[in-house]
Amino acid sequence: MITVGALFVVVAGLTQTGAMALIVQPLLGRPRTVLGAQLRLLLPVTTLSAFLNNTPVVAMFMPVVDEICKKTNISPSKLFHAMAFAATFGGVCTMIGTSTNLVVAG
């Protein structure tokens, strides 16, 4: 739990400084369709979620996704829902992605 709490501090720092937007913006670009935005969001969220806890990964991407939704007039619910599924999928792909996997493996 201490590690997850520490990740939230890192997320807050990345979000407040704008570093997260600088990192993610080239990956996501300016999609024109909902499907395009979902597909561009899938890879970075799934990859990070495989090696970090799901909750901080989603917290890290929420402000970026919200900004993209405002710029492209895409409904936020369509991207947030896809992001949650991508984070869950990435978490179950590796042994360290989700704490439940570690309990079952033990």
Image: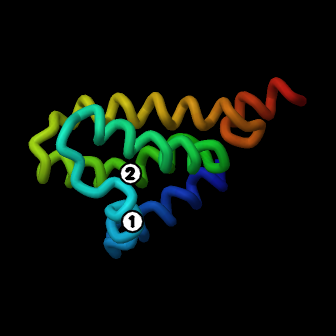
Q: Is residue 104 above or below residue 8?
A: above
Name the residue type under label 2.
Phe
Query: Does residue 64 appear to the left or right of 87 in the view shown?
Result: left
Q: Residue furthest right?
A: 106
Three-letter code for the amino acid on which mark 1 is drawn: Met
Q: Residue, x 49% and y 57% (percent of image)?
A: 8
Q: Which colour scheme is used?
A: rainbow
**Alpha-carbon distance for marks 2 and 1?**
8 Å
Which x, y percent locates residue 106? Answer: 89, 30
Q: Left or right of 84: which side holds 80?
A: left
Q: Which of 45 and 1 is in front in this view?
A: 45
Q: Earlier in the sequence, mark 2 or mark 1?
A: 1
Q: Residues within 10 Å of mark 1 (few under 14, many from 20)?
A: some
| Circle on res. 90 | none
Residue 46 lies left or right of residue 21; in this view the side is right
Question: At numbered mark 1, what does the secondary structure look like: helix, strand or loop?
Answer: helix
Q: Is residue 43 above or below residue 88?
A: below
Q: Mark 2 points at which residue?
A: 61
Q: Name the residue under label 1.
A: 20
Image x and y of residue 48, in percent: 57, 50
Please tell me in which quadrant of the rendered image residue 93 appears: top right
Q: Residue furthest top?
A: 104
x then y, percent, for residue 6:
58, 60
Residues tagged 2 and 1 counted as in contact (Cβ below 8 A)? yes
Judge left or right: residue 93 versus residue 46. right
- Residue for point 46% across, 28% down: 85
- Residue 103 position, x and y percent, is 80, 29
* Image point (57%, 30%), residue name: 89
